[in-house]
Structure formats: C-alpha cells, structure tokens
Image (cartoon, grey):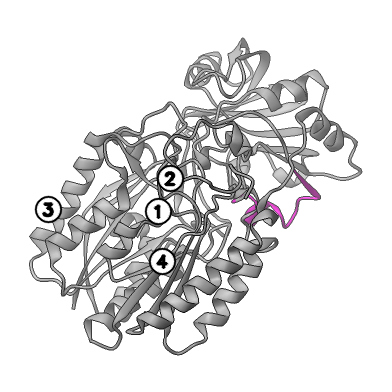
Amino acid sequence: MKFVVAMLSHETNMFSSVKTELRHFKERELCYGEEMFTAFKGTKTGIGGAMDAAKANNIELIPTVAANAMPSGLVTADAYRTLKRKILDGIKAAGAVDGFVGILHGSMAVEGVGNAEGDFLRDVRGALGSQVPVVCTLDLHATVTKLMIESCDAIFGFNTNPHVDSYERAVEAVNAAVAISKGKIKPVMALRKPAMMPPTINMRTTEGPMVKIFERAYKIERDPLVVNVNVAGGFPFMDTEEAGFSIVVITNDDRELAEKYAQQLSDFAWSVRREFLKPLTAVPEAVKRAMEAKEGPVILADVADNPGGGGSGDGTVVLKTLLDMGARNVGFALIKDPEAVDKAIKAGVGGTVTMMIGGKTDKFHGPPVKITGRVRTITDGTFIHKGPMSTGSKGEIGRSVVLTVNGVELIVSELKMAPNDPEIFRRHGIEPTEKRILVVKSRGHFRAGYEPFAKEIIEVDAPGVASPNLKQFPYKHVRRPLFPLDDI
C-alpha cells in the first residue's frame, strides 16, 4: 500500500495584526519531500506517528510538505496557495495511492478563504477521487466545519490539553485509513455544534468541564460500532460563522447511531458551558502573591500574550510590574524583540545596555519599557524539546540573549514562542526549578512541563489578543447568540 502524508498547520488569531506569510512557516517548520522524514524521525509528533504507523503496516509513505507556523493573524492567500499547490502536486506525482493522511490544526484562516481546512480537504479529495481514504488529525482547538466533514472520511482530534497525544492520534488515523482501504470499516460522521465558544483557559483535560465531557466520549467509544469520538473545544479567536465548540461522532456505517451519540454529547457539553469561565488575577496582585509565597517557583502565566494563541510575544505589562515592585530571582520567558537582541549581542556578554524593550508589534500588549541590563548569555536560540509535548523535536527562537535586569533574568529573542518546555530556560543557562518566580507567556500547554515542579500557578489578567475575556473583541462573523458573548 502507498499513502501520501502532509502537514499544514496554523492556529489563526483573526484579531492579530500580524499576517502570516510563507516566511513565518520557514521560521518554525517548513520542509519538503524526504526532508520531512529526516526532521521528524523518532519524534513524538504527528508526522513521527504517521511514519511509525506506516512502517508497522508495511505502507510506503510519500512525503509532500510539512508546514507549521506560530499562531498569528490571517494566513496570506499567497502563502496558502503555495503550500496547497505543493501538496497537490505531490499527490499528482505519487500516482495511484491507497490513502491520504493530513496532519492539520483545524483553526487555520486564510485571506479570502476563511476556514482553510475544509477548502484544503475538498481539493485533496478532488485530486484523489472518492474511493481513496482521506483522514486527518486535528488539534483539540480545531474549528470543525461542515465542509471538513464532507471532504474526508474520518478525523482524529487530540484527546489531551496540553496536547501530548499528537503521535497517538496520527497512528490512529493511519490505522483507520488502512481499515477503510481494506473495506473493514465504512465510517460515517455526525457533527454537532452547540451555541458555545468557550475561552480556552479552562479547557484542560486534567480538570474542569473537559474531563466530564471526555469521560462521556470514552464511554461512547466503548460501543463496538463507534470508530471515534472527537471533542473540539474550538479556538475563540476565529471570527467565522462556524467558530466554537464541536462534537464529531464516527460510527461504522450507522448514521442513526452517530447522530444520536453526537446529539447526546453536544447536549451535555452545553449543560456544563458555564464551567469553562474562569477569573484571572490582576497583574499587581499576582506579582505580590508570588513575591510573598513561602516557596517557589511560582509561575505567572501571561495568558493574553500567549504566542501559542496568536499573542505578539512582546507584551510588557507583567515585566514592568515585576520591575516596579522590586521582584527578585525571576526567570522570564520571553520578550520577542529583534532590535534589542541585536543591541545586546553588539554589547557582548558582560556588557551593559540601556534601551526600550518590547511593545513594538502593536498597541494591544503594553508600551515599550525602558530597561538597563547586563548581558548574561548569548545563544542561537535552538534547543530540543524534552518535555511531554513534541518530544525530540527542535525548538527555535532565533538569536537570543539573557538580560539581567535587577532581579529579573529576561530571555529576549528574535522570534516568538510559547515557552511550554522548561528546556527553553535551561538552554539559556537558567535552571527553572531554582527560581522563585517564573513568567511564561503561555495559556496552558506549559502545564505539562512545569506542573511537576511548580509550587503555584497564577494566570494573570494582562492585555493581549489572546485574552480569555472574549467580550472585548469586535466579532463580526460568528453566529449569534453564542455563549459566552451572549448570556444564554
């Protein structure tokens, strides 16, 4: 058997002013053809899972494109067309194939297209015909649309948040494609979208309402006629008509059963919708609590400037508050500021720099802050993920420095990244377990790596385009009424 594999992944924050161009994919992950196998061999990633599952099933895997950019604003039409065309060209060049496996996000939005995954899968289906199985994996924060469901045979969404099962879901997708190709299963999918678009802040799968929903999903999956149950919390910064929560139930050729289970699970998700709402802590109060804590590290999570949710990564409010309040023994990851990095490198290790830092991308994350700091470390910003997420894969933040500013050791980088793996601190000579306070610009994925040693985690209410306070955003296209934008 011969399968084609492709990765096209972006989580689009439509309120971000930073358009996502092809260069942004190059900055994070972009490789073609056989380069994909070199980059992902042995990693606990979606492509790594597809590779291992193909080998286990004696499948020849045809690589096309692996493209993944940091969450930001709309993907440009040119970037999308370029990547999609290369994948479709790869499918054409492969000749007769027995299946297609897509490693997708599910909340990618493109200029002039809107939700992109449906458009993409429709064209893949058109290139392969109706008889070739088309399956894909999706992020737990996918925006599942009717077109996506109509254009593929089966979807396999993450069951975890933080997302530590991308490898397993890809293995599951490949195995399903094999079963479909051999006629062992005939999947039918039922989609339900309750009128809710909860913030992602309380969407973890270790506590809260998602635990209750997944417990019911797993119970449904015990039915031998059920192939898979997908629970997608959605991405609330997608301002599209189909934005929000989704339930997809896949059965083996039993439409009525799929529809029944999907409705039951959708109704239950609606019943617990208010449990997704969670208060944040004002920045001064959060810093005060962290400074007065008996033990550290206390983690201050700057959730609204989460680069993993489209934040600029250069928000300054938390940094300025720490400095104003005299906090000490602080590790801070990170501020994206290429200009500041360049000045620090020119000053050299041990040099002192005075400059305005951060707040340069837009007006939503706080103004630049004047600092005077000593250059402690200079690196190329490359490290290997050793935590539960993306284990074994490479992380890159461009050239980076550590500035010691009073009691704060501040990582400044050329590229933005949510510091979800503590290795980003260690790469820069900072042992995170020894800090009294750690600042991470992340919404929740950091918990997989930091919770084992953190003494407390405080989610702070700083400004930013990834804020869970959704009513502040100027939605124009989502369906209404929609919880929590509307009190329903």
Say left or right for 341 vs 279.
left
Q: Earlier in the sequence, mark 2 or mark 1?
A: 2
In percent of width and height, residue 339 lies at 48, 16
Q: What's the residue type where badge 4 is placed?
A: Leu
Cα distance between the residues tagged 2 and 1: 7 Å
Q: Which residue is mark 2?
A: 11
Let me know if residue 51 appears in the view. yes
> Of helix, strand and loop, which one carries label 1?
loop
In percent of width and height, residue 125 lies at 18, 63
Task: Answer whether labels 2 and 1 touch (C-beta < 8 Å).
Answer: yes
Q: Earlier in the sequence, mark 1 or mark 4?
A: 1
Q: What's the residue type where badge 1 is placed?
A: His
Say left or right for 256 vs 127.
right
Q: Which residue is mark 4?
A: 191
Which mark is drawn over residue 89? 3
> Of helix, strand and loop, which one carries label 3?
helix
Q: What's the residue type where badge 3 is placed?
A: Asp
Task: Answer whether labels 4 and 3 touch (C-beta < 8 Å).
Answer: no
Q: For residue 427, what is the image quadrant?
A: top right
Q: What span is in magenta? A: 445-458
Q: Earlier in the sequence, mark 2 or mark 3?
A: 2
In percent of width and height, residue 318 lies at 70, 27
Q: Which residue is mark 1?
A: 105
